[in-house]
Image (tube, rainbow, N blue to C red):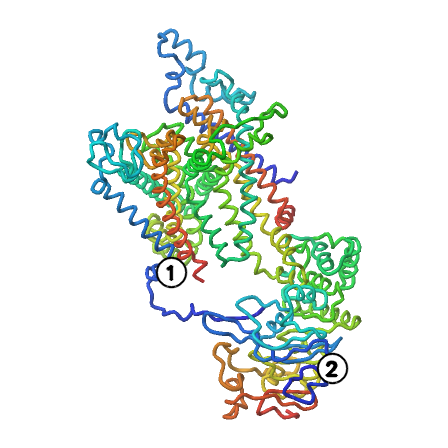
């Protein structure tokens, strides 16, 4: 089970076993002139080897910050203020900078959102890929180059040998994202954190990239945290899904259960707004109201001001309720048949 | 990362005149305020020089060759005065010479910067508004001139014209107009596409009126920034040219010439003749630059967001 | 050779041509050269003979044509003061100026880039603030006054370094160089530093601005996510990006170093062509002035052309756009 939380006592202990990544009560805050922004506020989940977790939420829900917190690449004014991140038994929140560096790219790789921005425009592809290998291993340059070439081949880049000598601007967006994925795969990491890697791409390219990543990670038994605002993308490839709202997980569980029987009204709203889930001619449902201002969250349940189910009870902080490895943070969950 | 953090900027009260905003943002930098204060004092000293200088340094009757090259703090032979900053080879009080020198330096600097601003902005506006071959000729000359260092252009002109205050000012204007022209043109090119200019054109308002009453005021902020920088540059350049013996004549010594006069006494350790005029020059230029730096931040439309 | 380059080459030639006209007219129209050329004690006949011999009785355009004709043969006139071809005199002085300007350029890079990097990477540190304050000062300080103060401090008060001249030189390929002897180097330090001061400030500011612009980029974050060392990120990812604009500017600034050498050479009695032009202006040696200006114009136009070219070679993005 993935997205289980400490509060669900009995389950927690068993879930930690076999987990390569275990996040507990993670808090990442941003100190801004206007006040402290709690971008991630008490997040917990586990991830087993080879498992794909979809992390879903609106922009500002803290999903990207979660990803960057795990590899400790949060930039000031952001700061991890509490919680534990345990990766293969190693505690990351207290790890030294050098320990973190050795981990990044070697054991935990990342893929970013905008492929146009992630490759250095003045360095050739081979330089940028070979350095990713040589940062972690003493490998002769020819061997590193061969590995880079093979990685490019694997992600479906034609004539990789020649493309190695190219500069990023000579690639299309989709091709650049393939290069970034190949780079992430170079050192056969245990975990890949993909931060909206297909959002900036055309729909057809999106599907290709999705299929590619799915195949490659399955072959190598690599765990993936797939961050996306698009529930439909996640539902196609993830084993488990966790829905974030205002810095917290509001619902999590096996993907089929969450999609087919959402319990949190927010999740239900997200699913309702997917065109494919609606019947022809029926109006698309939508979540009314605006994305929350993290500086000015309502007391109690953060979603209650946008929620149709909300009542007086929601003025209190909802805890996590669990049933069969499917958790939700709501006093008035939607019924199974809803 | 997709994080949107609201800043306090949006919560500011909406009623604030532009001038007030500039003033408030300007005073945020203590250094800039200090610069402005220093500049005000320098200008005041220059204006009041005849009233506050211990002596008239160019009234030969007041000078005594006996007082020549006295160290700072020494008294005159006849005991009538103390030379706070020493004297030069002719027994001239350096403090008085500096106060008078400030006048010339500031005058030349401001005069040339203002004239260059007028000529440059006018040509830049015309280039942007009229376009066509007039624009390409003006901008070609601007490009050409900006590709040569200022000192070289000034040197060339003074080589043709010979020295003198008027010639120096003329040379500085020729050196500096191009920067204004470029700035005015790029500002005007953006402005002229806006609707209020189109509206003015439809009302058949005369071209010169559109140029100077409508276009110019809206291109002013970057021009003001350029002007502060250019005044500092003009003063430095004038000092440099005078130091090289190509600038102002000995009868109207600016700070640069005072420094040059001390050059030959430097090797024998009489530093003050060159040192103090240089300090005065430095204070003046640094304070102008500090003001200019802050003005750039405040007036830059990009930084206003 | 690509078409755009030929076009720019042609434009450059046009500029040189136009500038020769300006220089020639400027020098000829203002003041009467005959007054300077003819000895004061010459009589009317003698005077006429000299004027005819020099072609000063010809209309201006004819004078200009013969000037251009001669210039194309490498004859820019004969110096009144030296009694030698102006071009030869200038060429003799040129290496000294180049040596000085080049040393200043190296100092600017050597000091400017590391200081700018530091100030850009730790923008709020005390040292960074001091560096930036220093750079404002470097911009504001009048070069000539700093030169004097350097002489005052290091030559007069401390006696560590000589106050002027080139010192001992070594002949290499028929040209005298100071930097090859210990004494020559000692003579070179102060003037080179003086000339470099402004450029150091410039490079610091450029480097800092570049670092501040590059550091928040996604590709730097991605480089971190790859587990690269901070050292590698700065020395390769950051530096390679900011080096392009810096090199462009430094290249352009080489010309201005040559120009500002006029001041430094005068202060430190450095026998280069900058000191030569000042002396020539003061002694109204018109052929020298014309020759100097023509050479400088050619020189600057060439520099601009080279920088244009370098820029295209260095930045792969520009290359692609102009190549297509």
The residue singled out by tag 2 in the image is A17
Q: Give coordinates of residue B214: x percent, y percent.
A: 35, 54
- Chain letter of disc 1 in the image: B
Quadrant (top left, top right, bottom left, bottom right) of the N terminus of chain C: top right
Q: Residue at the spot x=75%, y=69% of the render?
A: A212
| Viewer-nearest residue: C167 or C242 | C167
The residue singled out by tag 1 in the image is B28
Using the image, determine if residue C323 lies above or below residue A134: above
The number of numbered badges drawn on the structure is 2
B50 relative to A130 in the view: left or right: left
Q: Give coordinates of residue B150: x percent, y percent.
A: 44, 37
| Viewer-nearest residue: C266 or A119 | C266
Q: Residue at the spot x=40%, y=57% of the render?
A: B298
SS of the residue under disc 1: loop
Using the image, determine if residue C92 lies above or below residue B259: above
- Chain letter of disc 2 in the image: A
C274 relative to A200 in the view: left or right: left
Using the image, determine if residue C138 lies above or below residue C39: below
Is the same chain shared between marks 1 and 2? no
Using the image, determine if residue A18 lies above or below residue C52: below
């Amino acid at each position: 089970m993935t997205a289980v939380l400490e509060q669900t006592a009995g389950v927690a202990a068993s879930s930690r076993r076999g987990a390569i990544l275990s996040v507990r009560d993670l808090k990442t805050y941003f100190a801004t002139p206007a006040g402290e922004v709690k971008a991630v506020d008490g997040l917990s989940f586990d991830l087993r080897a080879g498992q794909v977790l979809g992390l879903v939420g609106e922009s500002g829900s803290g999903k990207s910050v979660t990803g960057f917190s795990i590899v400790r690449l949060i930039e000031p004014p952001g700061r991890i203020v509490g919680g534990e991140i345990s990766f293969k038994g190693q505690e990351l929140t207290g790890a030294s900078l050098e320990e973190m560096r050795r981990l990044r790219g070697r054991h935990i790789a990342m893929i970013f959102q905008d492929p146009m921005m992630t490759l250095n425009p003045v360095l050739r592809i081979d330089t940028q890929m070979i350095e990713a290998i040589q940062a972690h291993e003493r490998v002769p340059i020819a061997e590193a180059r061969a590995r880079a070439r093979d990685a490019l081949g694997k992600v479906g880049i034609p004539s990789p040998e020649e493309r190695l000598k190219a500069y990023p601007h000579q690639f299309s967006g989709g091709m650049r994202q393939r290069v970034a994925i190949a780079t992430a795969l170079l050192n056969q990491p245990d975990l890949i954190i993909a931060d909206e890697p297909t959002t900036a791409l055309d729909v057809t390219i999106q599907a290709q990239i999705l299929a590619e990543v799915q195949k490659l990670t399955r072959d190598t038994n690599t765990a993936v945290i797939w961050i996306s605002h698009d529930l439909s993308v996640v539902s196609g490839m993830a084993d488990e899904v966790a829905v974030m709202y205002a810095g917290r997980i509001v619902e999590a569980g096996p993907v089929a259960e969450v999609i087919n029987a959402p319990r949190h009204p927010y999740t239900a709203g997200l699913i309702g707004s997917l065109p494919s889930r609606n019947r022809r001619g029926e109006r698309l449902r939508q979540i009314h109201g605006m994305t929350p201002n993290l500086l000015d969250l309502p007391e109690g349940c953060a979603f209650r001001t946008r929620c149709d189910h909300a009542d007086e009870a929601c003025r209190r902080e909802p805890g996590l309720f669990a049933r069969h490895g499917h958790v939700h943070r709501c006093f008035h969950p939607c019924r199974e048949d809803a | 990362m997709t994080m949107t953090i609201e800043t306090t900027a949006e919560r500011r009260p909406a009623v604030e005149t532009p001038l007030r905003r500039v003033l408030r943002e300007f005073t945020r930098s203590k250094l800039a305020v200090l610069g402005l204060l220093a500049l005000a004092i320098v200008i005041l000293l220059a204006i009041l020089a005849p009233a506050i200088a211990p002596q008239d340094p160019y009234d030969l009757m007041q000078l005594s060759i006996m007082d020549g090259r006295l160290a700072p703090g020494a008294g005159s032979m006849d005991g009538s005065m103390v030379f706070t900053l020493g004297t030069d080879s002719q027994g001239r009080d350096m403090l008085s010479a500096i106060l008078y020198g400030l006048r010339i330096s500031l005058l030349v600097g401001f005069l040339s910067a203002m004239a260059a601003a007028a000529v440059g902005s006018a040509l830049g506006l015309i280039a942007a508004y009229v376009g066509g071959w007039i624009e390409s000729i003006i901008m070609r000359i601007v490009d050409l001139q900006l590709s040569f260092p200022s000192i070289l252009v000034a040197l060339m002109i003074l080589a043709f014209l010979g020295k003198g205050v008027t010639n120096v000012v003329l040379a500085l204007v020729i050196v500096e107009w191009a920067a204004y022209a470029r700035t005015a043109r790029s500002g005007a090119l953006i402005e002229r596409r806006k609707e209020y200019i189109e509206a003015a054109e439809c009302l058949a308002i005369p071209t010169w009126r559109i140029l100077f009453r409508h276009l110019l005021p809206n291109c002013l902020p970057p021009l003001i920034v350029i002007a502060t920088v250019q005044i500092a540059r003009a003063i430095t350049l004038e000092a440099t040219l005078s130091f090289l013996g190509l600038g102002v004549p000995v009868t109207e010594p600016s700070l640069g010439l005072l420094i040059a006069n001390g050059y030959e006494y430097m090797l024998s350790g009489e530093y003050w003749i060159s040192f103090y005029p240089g300090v005065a020059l430095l204070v003046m230029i640094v304070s102008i630059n500090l003001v200019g730096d802050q003005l750039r931040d405040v007036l830059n439309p990009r930084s206003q967001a | 050779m690509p078409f755009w380059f030929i076009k720019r080459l042609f434009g450059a030639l046009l500029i040189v041509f136009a500038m020769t006209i300006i220089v020639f007219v400027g020098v000829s129209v203002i003041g009467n050269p005959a007054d300077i050329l003819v000895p004061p004690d010459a009589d009317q006949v003698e005077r006429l003979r000299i004027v005819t011999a020099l072609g000063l009785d010809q209309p201006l355009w004819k004078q200009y044509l013969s000037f251009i004709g001669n210039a194309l043969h490498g004859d820019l006139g004969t110096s009144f003061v030296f009694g030698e071809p102006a071009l030869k005199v200038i060429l003799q002085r040129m290496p000294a100026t180049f040596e000085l300007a080049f040393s200043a350029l190296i100092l600017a890079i050597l000091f400017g880039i590391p200081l700018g990097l530091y100030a850009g990477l730790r923008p709020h540190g005390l040292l960074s603030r001091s560096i930036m304050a220093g750079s404002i000062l470097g911009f504001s300080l009048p070069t000539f006054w700093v030169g004097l103060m350097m002489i005052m401090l290091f030559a007069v008060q401390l006696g560590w370094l000589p106050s002027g001249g080139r010192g001992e030189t070594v002949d290499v390929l028929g040209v005298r160089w100071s930097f090859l002897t210990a004494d020559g180097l000692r003579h070179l330090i102060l003037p080179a530093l003086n000339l470099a001061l402004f450029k150091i400030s410039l490079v610091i500011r450029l480097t800092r601005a570049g670092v501040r612009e590059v550091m928040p980029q996604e590709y730097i974050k991605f480089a971190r996510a790859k587990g690269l060392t901070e050292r590698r990120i700065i020395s390769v990812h950051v530096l390679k990006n900011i080096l392009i604009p810096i090199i462009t500017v430094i290249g352009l600034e080489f010309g201005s170093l040559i120009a500002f050498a006029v001041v430094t050479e005068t202060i430190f009695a450095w026998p280069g062509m900058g000191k030569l032009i000042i002396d020539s202006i003061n002694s109204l040696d018109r052929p020298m002035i014309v020759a100097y200006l023509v050479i400088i114009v050619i020189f600057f136009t060439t520099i601009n052309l080279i920088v244009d070219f370098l820029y295209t070679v260095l930045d792969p993005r520009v290359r692609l756009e102009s190549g297509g």
